[in-house]
């Protein structure tokens, strides 16, 4: 039997994830009282094949009983009962924004500001995050992207290293992305903006890609960047990093940065040649995003 405890910070997408797991064939129970978790595990383990995939939602709605969950996990482990923990997280500013958009109050805010409630919740759930088998940061994830990550873990049974990478193109004229972990400036390459017939196109168009990639410096940059990123990834994973934003910028975020961000994304979507020989595949989440590609759109 596969028994999953789905938990995390309120507003990070637990309800959505639980519905997705139900669609994946899991028998899902939300907000199960913690004193019943062990009994429910036992009943599920002795049930028919229909209950061989179970997901249980546990969060701060359990109130004071939440502190008992650590003892429950220890007893299950001592009895040899395998239990996986999926923890959904998100950045505080994103959570606050989500609460403002839905006009809901945080369960632990107690009449104060939302960020106060989030802080209390993080403290109460700290032990669950520390014991989590999978941590997914939903700060930058669309609903469909969250579904892809869940399918990797719970349908395709791929090894998952709790790291989600966003390759982000941007324009320096609009500011460096606030959540960038790594920032690379590609303004050293010739700018297609000044080439007749190319100004209105962007890095998703083949004409711009051909222009930017005709320069040997672009390929040298990509080779060195890929080599460095592949060196950093296992170290970030070992350190426990959950979210990595690799930002590539040019002047307006429309031509050079988009082209090279796309190229890096394609490279990171594949394992290096030596890993391919062993049938390996990337075990981290990956997405591409172009922040400023539609800004300053000009019309004839």
Image: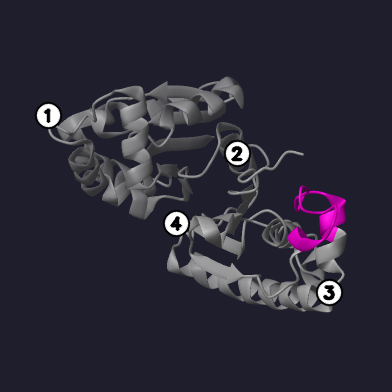
Q: How is the image coloured?
A: one colour
Q: Is residue 193 magenta?
A: yes
Neighbor class of circle 1 (other Cα within 10 Å; few <14, some 14-19, many 20+) is: few
Instruction: Please state if 197 lies on the left or on the right of 250 as rendered.
Output: right
Q: Which mark is residue 21?
A: none
Pair 1/4: label in front = 4
Nearer to me, 28 or 16: 16
Work out which quarter of the rendered image holds the N terminus and state it: top right
Asked if one can make out residue 280 in the rendered structure from this viewpoint, the answer is no
Residue drawn 59% across and 42% down? 149
Mark 2 — residue?
Answer: 145
Q: Which residues are magenta?
A: 192-209
Q: Closer to the camera: disc 4 or disc 2?
A: 4
98 sits to left or right of 224:
left
- Tag 4 secondary structure: loop
Say which element carries label 2. helix
Mark found first going from the N terminus, 1 or 4: 1
Crowd rating for badge 2 (residues with CA inside 10 Å; few <14, some 14–19, many 20+): some
Residue pointed to by mark 4:
179
Name the spot of residue 255 as percent of width and height, x first: 72, 57
């Amino acid at each position: 039997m596969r028994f999953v405890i789905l938990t995390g910070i309120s507003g990070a997408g637990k309800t959505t994830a639980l519905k997705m797991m139900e669609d994946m064939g899991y028998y899902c129970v939300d907000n199960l009282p913690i004193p019943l978790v062990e009994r429910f595990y036992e009943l599920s383990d002795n049930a028919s094949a229909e209950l061989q995939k179970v997901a249980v939602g546990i969060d701060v709605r359990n109130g004071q009983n939440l502190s008992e969950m650590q003892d429950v996990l220890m007893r299950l482990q001592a009895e040899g009962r395998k239990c996986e923990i999926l923890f959904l997280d998100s950045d505080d500013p994103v959570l606050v924004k989500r609460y403002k958009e839905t006009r809901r109050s945080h369960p632990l805010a107690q009449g104060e500001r939302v960020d106060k409630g989030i802080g209390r919740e993080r403290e109460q759930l700290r032990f669950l995050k520390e014991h989590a088998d999978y941590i997914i940061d939903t700060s930058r994830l669309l609903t469909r992207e969250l579904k892809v990550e869940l399918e990797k873990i719970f349908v395709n049974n791929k090894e998952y290293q709790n790291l989600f990478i966003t390759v982000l193109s941007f324009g320096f004229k609009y500011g460096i992305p606030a959540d960038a972990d790594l920032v690379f400036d590609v303004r050293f390459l010739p700018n297609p903006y000044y080439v007749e017939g190319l100004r209105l196109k962007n890095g998703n168009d083949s004409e711009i890609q051909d222009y930017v990639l005709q320069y040997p410096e672009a390929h040298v940059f990509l080779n060195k960047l890929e080599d460095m990123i592949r060196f950093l990834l296992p170290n970030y994973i070992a350190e426990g990093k959950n979210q990595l934003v690799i930002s590539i910028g040019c002047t307006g975020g429309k031509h050079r940065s988009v082209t090279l961000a796309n190229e890096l994304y394609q490279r990171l979507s594949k394992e290096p040649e030596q890993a391919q020989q062993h049938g390996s595949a990337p075990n981290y989440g990956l997405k591409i995003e172009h922040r400023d590609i539609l800004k300053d759109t000009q019309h004839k």
